[in-house]
Amino acid sequence: MCGIAGVVRSSGVRGGDAAQAQKMADIMRHRGPDDEGLREADFYVFSHRRLSIIDLAGGHQPMSNETGDIWLVFNGEIYNFGELHDKLVALGHSFRSRCDTEVIIHLYEEYGPGCVSRLNGMFALAIFDEPRQRLFLARDRAGIKPLYYSLDGGVLRFASEAKALVMTAPRPPEPDPRSVMDFFALSLVQGGRTAFKGISELEPAHSLTWELGDGRPRLERYWRLSYASKIDLVGEDLAAEVSSLIEDAVRTHLISDVPVGTYLSGGLDSSLVTAVADGYLPHLNTFSAGFVGKEKVDERVFAREAAAMLGTDHHEVEVGPGDFITNLRKIIWHMDEPTLSPGVYPYYFLCGLVADSVKVVLGGQGSDELFGGYPRYRMALLENDMALSARRLRLLHLAVDAREYKRRYGAGSLKNELLRLGAPADRRIYEIVSGFHPRRLPQLFSAGFRREVQEYDPLTVFQNSLDECDSDSLIDRMLYNDYHNMLASILRTEDRMSMAHSIESRVPLLDYRLVQLAASIPAGAKVSGDEPKLILKQVARGRVPESIITRRKQGFSAPIDSWFIGALGSEVRELLLGERARARGIFESSHVEHLLKRALEQKKDIWRLWSLVTFEMWCRIFVDGETGRMAEGFQGD
């Protein structure tokens, strides 16, 4: 795991480009404190920070081929590199190291840009092919590893973190208004944009190729997830196929020359990954986070049960609201963008705990998006039944479904559902996954900001993305959207919080072979009635405690409702309604006051309040110019 950066100039590098590339790497020192490297050539400068995991002595970057005319900087891990190494040797390639970095170089020599389709792993990479004067950037299929870039005339700059580009840019950063709208509409930024105007994110499963003599770079998608064809296996045979792939994915993700552990939250996914890993490692360290006091979101009792069953060496960290603003400032500086989930807060401390014992950690992220773990999938099935009953005037069935909907999700959710009952299915998906409800979103923004974004509709971009799905199934389309959108937010947290503490976090359930298999499983075999992740539960049975399999999904979060209502209330109020926040002119202060009151007095809109808090903190750090001081103070965290 590393940090990569570079400056590529079609007219040839200039004085200061090398210093700029070096500064970008220095800003990301936390991503790779073990080694650093710089390569300056006629048209490009590459810089690198290394976190040494495999071939500790032989993996220095930037790395070249034997003739020194193809150079690579790479962030990630390639789990099939051993198999690729042997095939490349048989084709006549010779190796100077035993690391996955050199495998990528020779694979590029053999197959050109098409090499990425042969990689199984998490990666963000940059190659400069000197004979062809070609820059090639690529990112893994799921987007586990990040890559950002900016293009200004004939100069392209790239880095593993947006802040490296922001802090070395010639002009102060500005928020992208469309991205602000996206964040509050959907809790994510769409279409490869970022919160920063002028900085793009290379999307997952995409590559960028720039032939320096041919004008602008070319973006291409090299892989697409398909839901069109369905697997014939059912029952035990299907469970066996899923189990076999999970087993192989976890096994390959354990390759390392440094100690490896696992997250163990007490949920199904991390418990299953831990159980499989425990079968391969003689001594396994596991890690979980809990909270000060008797908080309902504390899952440590389940994590302890799984650790006891498996016999792991279990570690815990307890998180409270102390120094909240100081800690949040650190977290948002590392995140680069505002964030939806309060789970990022305890995750920061959990990664700090991991760093005390191991350098590599495996988690269960991704299974909800693959196997239907979120409550909204069952919500959508019930909504679909209600819509069908309404169209066919089956009023008794509609009443029964409405009563069940209210029992599961509350009167407020039922009201929203009845209002959208006649809408197309894709519109209902949009409303289900929205952060601020589309009908209420305009109330959040000031009149001036609404004028600024009046020609932009997040639903249009959302719909275009959803239309790429090659299935008409409601659940398939929801899973497709979550895999391509919701998962991006989760993986950003995964990457930034682990890298903040210089550890490598791996996600074996996002092995692309398992992702493809999950997409081929009929929706009814993954989600049915009030039961999520049917196949995964079948795979886990007998490997993890039954109480974990049967318990209701909770999710990794933080008790921000009790924190905000308690000691943090005044700090949150100052943050959202103080002079600095009001002066931005983005939000309607009276509506923010309304949301604050509902949250602090009625425990409603807590997640919406959290998104406002993280956005204001992001503005203070990046828009108000606190980045330099933050870099000096927090790079070592």
Image: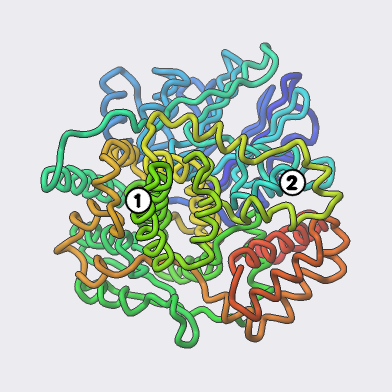
Amino acid type indicated by mark 1: Gly
Instruction: Count how many numbered circles sit on residues in the image.
Output: 2
User: Is residue 622 shown above or below 312?
Assistant: above
Q: Taking the image as drawn, is residue 5 in sight?
A: no
User: Is residue 530 shown above or below 236?
Assistant: below
Q: Secondary structure at mark 1?
A: loop
Q: Taking the image as drawn, is residue 80 in sight?
A: yes
Q: Residues within 10 Å of mark 2 (few under 14, many from 20)?
A: many
Q: Residues within 10 Å of mark 1 (few under 14, many from 20)?
A: many
User: Is residue 375 shown above or below 2?
Assistant: below
Amino acid type indicated by mark 2: Val
- Counting from the top left corner in percent of width and height, residue 440 is at 68, 56
Q: Which mark is residue 372?
A: 1
Residue for point 69% across, 49% down: 163
Q: Which of 371 and 590 lies nearest the eye of the viewer?
A: 590
**Left or right: 537, with 422 as reference point:** left
Q: Which of 561 and 95 lies nearest the eye of the viewer?
A: 561
Task: Please state which of the two labelled residues, at mark 1 or mark 2, is closer to the viewer.
Answer: 1
Residue for point 29% across, 18% down: 91
Q: Which residue is mark 2?
A: 166
Dividing the picture into quadrants, the one containing residue 602 is bottom right
Q: Which of 457 and 156 lies nearest the eye of the viewer?
A: 457
Dividing the picture into quadrants, the one containing residue 305 is bottom left
Compare marks 1 and 2 and give the one earlier in the sequence.
2
- Counting from the top left corner in percent of width and height, residue 393 is at 40, 46
Quadrant of the snapshot with the C terminus: bottom right
